[in-house]
Every structure is written in C-alpha cells, then in structure tokens.
Amino acid sequence: MSTMSVSTPPDAAVPDAAAPAVGPSPLALALRAWPVRIALAVLCLVVLMAILAPFVGTTNPTRIDPAFRLKPPSAAHWLGTDGFGRDVYSRLVYGARISLIVGTGVVLLAVSVGLVVGVLAGYFRVVDAIVMRVMDGMMAIPGILLAIALVALTGAQVTTILVAIAIPEVPRVVRLVRSVVLGIRGEAFVEAAQTLGTRVLPMIGRHLLPSTLAPLLVLGTYIFASAIMTEAVLSFLGAGLPPQTPTWGNLMADGRAYFMLQPGIVLYPGLLVSMLVLSVNVLGDALRDGLDPRMAKRI
Amino acid sequence: MALLVLRRLMAAIPVLFIVALIVFSVLRLAPGDPAALVAGDNASPEQVAVIRQSMGLDRPVLEQFARWLGKAVQGDLGESLISSQPVSTLVADRLGPSLSLAICTIVLSVAVAIPLGVVAAWKQGRPLDRALMAGSVLGFSVPVFIIGYVLIFVFARTLHWLPVQGYQPLSEGIGAFAKRLLMPTVALSFPYIALIARIVRTSVMEVMGEDFIRTARAKGAPERVVLLRHALGNAAVPIVTVIGMSVAMLIGGVVVTESVFNIPGLGRLVLESVQGRDFTVIQALILLFSVVYVFLNLAIDVLYVIVDPRIRY
C-alpha cells in the first residue's frame, strides 16, 4: 500500500526506489511478532472452544442441580458448580459461542450499515450535512446506556442484543468511511471516473470502496473486541440474555452473590473475556501497523 | 472568546435536539402500555384510560415530544413511574456518589497517566516503554468490573484491608469515604490511564521530533525542562482531547462500577429504572447524560483555544 516513486534519477547513488520490494510485506512482518502469535492462538482456542463445545467434556450447561450448589472443583465438575448447581466449566465453554456470535454479528451489522451511510455521506454533500448531525447526536448518548435501554425495551434475544450493541458502533464506522471517501474524493482517479461519466454505483463500488477496506478491517477488529466486552457488561448488569443462557457475563452476574465463597465463578469467565478482548485488540493493532502505519492517526 | 463560546453553543443546539429526538423515539419503541403499567394489574380499562390521559399519552406523538422537551428544558424531567418522585429529586439524591467517583477517577487517571506517558516517550523503544505500552493494551482490554472483582478478591477477601463495597458520603468522615471509594476509583481508572498514557506518549514523541526541542537542548536546557515545559505544553491538544473523551466515556464506566461496588449513584439508578421499566426515568437520565456530554465537548473546544493559541475557529 506504500506509494513508491518511480522517478529516481538514474545516476543517483541512492538505492533504486523503483526496484520491487523484497522480503515479507509489512503486514506479514507485523503478524509475526510474538504477541500477535499468542493473540492468534488465543483466538483460535476460543473459536475451537465454541465449535467443539459439546465434545470437550461438557455436560448440559443449563441443568440445575440444587443438591450440588457451589461445590469446589472436582472430578465431576472440573471448575465446580454455581449457585444453581450448574457445571461452571460447561457454562464457560458454551459461553464462548455467545461471545463469538455476538462479536461477529455486531461487526457485520455495524460495518455494513456504517459503510453504506459513510460512503453516501462522504460522496454527497447534502447527505453529509444531515448524517453527521445525526451521528453527532448518536455519539453523544453513552453507548452502554443506549444498549441497555434498547435491550430492556425490545426483549432479550440474541438478535435484539446484536442490534442494541451494533447501533452505538455505527457512528464510528460512518466517521471513518466518510473521512476516507472525503480524502480520496479529490484524487485524480475519481475525477477521471466522473469525467468518463461513471454512474454512482460503479463509482462507489469500483473506485471508492477499495480504499475503505483496510481501515474497515482494522476498525472491525476493534469493534469485535468492543462488542464482546459490551455483551459481557450487559449480561453482567442483567440487561443481556436470560440468566439461564450460558454467557460469560451471565456467569459473572450469577457468581457475584457468592464471590466470597467461590470467587472462581466470577474470575474464570472474567479471565476469558479479558484474554479474548486483549487478543483481538493486539490483532487489531498489528493489522493497523501492518496495513498502513498512517492509519494509527485515524483509528 | 465570548463569540467562540456563543458559536459553539449555537452549533450544539441541533445536536441536542437530535439527541432528544433519538432518546424520545427509542423509548417509544417499548412494547406494552406504560399507562397499564402504572395502573396495575387490577385496574379497569376506564382507570387505565384516565391514567393514560393524565400522562398525556393519548395525544399525538409529536405533541408528546414537544411537551416533554419543553418541560425538560425548564428542568422538569417528569416523575418516576414507580415511586412518583420527581426525577430531579432522584437525580439530586444520587448525584453525590457518582460525582465523587467520577471526579476521583479523572484526577487519579490524569495524575498517573501523564507521568507514565511522558516517561514512556522519554525512554522510547526501551524496555520500560514497551512494558508500559503492553500494560496499556491490557488496561483497556480488561473490563472494568473484572478489575473490580480482582481488587475485591485481593484487598477485601484475602488481605481484609478494605471494605468490600458500599459508599460513605464525605460529610461522614474522610477516612471512611476514602476507604470505600479507593477500590472503585482504582478499578475505574485503569482503562483511562491506559488510554491517556498512550496518547500522551504518542503526542510527546511527535513533539520531541520538532526543531524547537532541538533548539532548547542546544541552548543547554536540562532534559526535565525540555520534556515538561516545551514538549508537554505543545503536545497538550491531543492530550486534552483524550481526557475529554475519557470523561465522556466515564458515564458508561460509572454504571458498571457502581453495580460492582454497590454504590448508590446515578449508574445504579439507571439499572434500577431499566429493571423496573420506569421509562420516564430512563428517558430523563439518558437525556441528562447526553446533554452533559455535549456540554463537555463544548468545554473541551473552548479549552483548546486556551491551551493552543494557534487554534482559531
């Protein structure tokens, strides 16, 4: 993605800038750093956990067993049981599913909506004026509060939670896409395309969109991390999925009352959430530095 | 200067209007009838109708919005559907704890983050810098309530140094106040320290590359003066931005922290009203927080001009 000048004087003693770059690309280099490798490993681990949940020694995560409440780790219950006698280990493993589903869903939703709105706002002045006011208004409302209110109003299913978490993320995407489009609007190739009479859709699709992809990828990674965290917070506050559903936030919410007795119920899901969010953030940083270091100012 | 403030205020008005619009319409999405909620299960349809009329819900939606907004601007945020107390009273009662937590957090965050960031920029590339930056990614990746629980685990459960939760107002003694507020403040500060330290480091690093820094060094100024007076002063704009952003983000953080540490503040009020479907209060609170955010941004814009005289709007 670096722009290399081809106009070096032939007699210069400077290295020939027109020669093709040898060696790994900046992206490959960024992704080889050991923190990134660990982050990728953690991410893969969580994904595997989610996919293979029924096969890794878990029992029914919603099965209540009042006789076995709050037991410490044992052979039957690898991480002990919670306040209702449910197996903590199983709930932990199944919880990965919700986190990943919510994370991916929110990113897809927020990015698709934000991309469309952002491109239109960047390209058409009239749209821009209205859209940016609305985005400013949306950004003024604290995201958590908006999400809590939305979930409380529309019910606690996965789809409503996805929408509730995605909505506060949309302004970030819109801003980024808009700034990219505004940045390239004055470029020669856009002007050339306009002169050639390119219609709006092909203009957007073929000329404007490709420049937004790299920044969007990086932002999407950050939104993924943020969505997982928000879902955990929502469940923890009791404003997320119903308490029987095994999510990491719900685990922590259940475990609060017994924290002094069995701190593990709160700490294990907490550890997992932290590790996953941390790994995704590290990945995002690596992607950002690898794709275009200039992005660091914008994202 | 006065003109600047006025212009910014004028620009803020459409944003505030849109915020009010969003807040109002979001809450109108509620399935279910608030009048029926207030009336209770055993009310007859006539009673529900009377209540609906007294709540103004039988008017057209636009008129409801206009009335609500009109009252809100005058400070009347309505009454709680559950307790019938005026929302303003509820807010006033809960303001103290939240404000204390917020202010202590900001002070702690800024006091810790700026030195950390400056040191990281100074020792750029060396192990200390790397460690600090790694710590900062950690700081905003670990959710606040988890940090809170870890702190409780270590300091309250294991070491028994600090009380687990609760809040003591300042009027009842500074010792108790501080002891109770210490863990929530530290827990809540983590992500902001992380964020602010990073930005401080980046901006100071950028400024350090400027010519006037080289000149100052050439003139024999001690490194400490170079760092603090020349670099930091000129790096102030992004730092002020991020501090402002953090203050705004605090609102969400306060909700969670109050829940973990059982502090009777505005954050807890939000949760209680959500659980109780008290949508007058929810509406009023979200509006209140958003208005605060908008005015905060305004204050930051004005602060920019003070900090960096080159900026002219």
Image: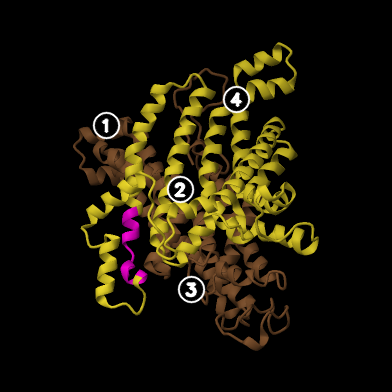
Chain colours: A brown, B yellow
Q: Secondary structure at mark 1?
A: helix
Name the residue tied to disc 3. A242
Disc 2 with disc 4 on a shared chain? yes
* Residue stretch rendered in magenta on the structure: B24-38
Observer-side mark, 2 or 3, equals 2
Instruction: Name the amino acid type tagged 1.
Output: Glu
- Judging depth in this view, the residue of A159 and A133 nearest the camera is A133
Give x and y (percent) for residue A194: 23, 35
Disc 4 with disc 3 on a shared chain? no
| Label 1 crowd bin: few (<14), some (14–19), many (20+), radius 10 Å | some
Give x and y (percent) for residue A240: 48, 67
Q: Chain of mark 4?
A: B
Q: Residue furthest left?
A: A197
Q: Measure the C-alpha gap from mark 1 to mark 4.
A: 36 Å
Magenta region, main secondary structure: helix
The disc label shown at residue B207, or none:
4
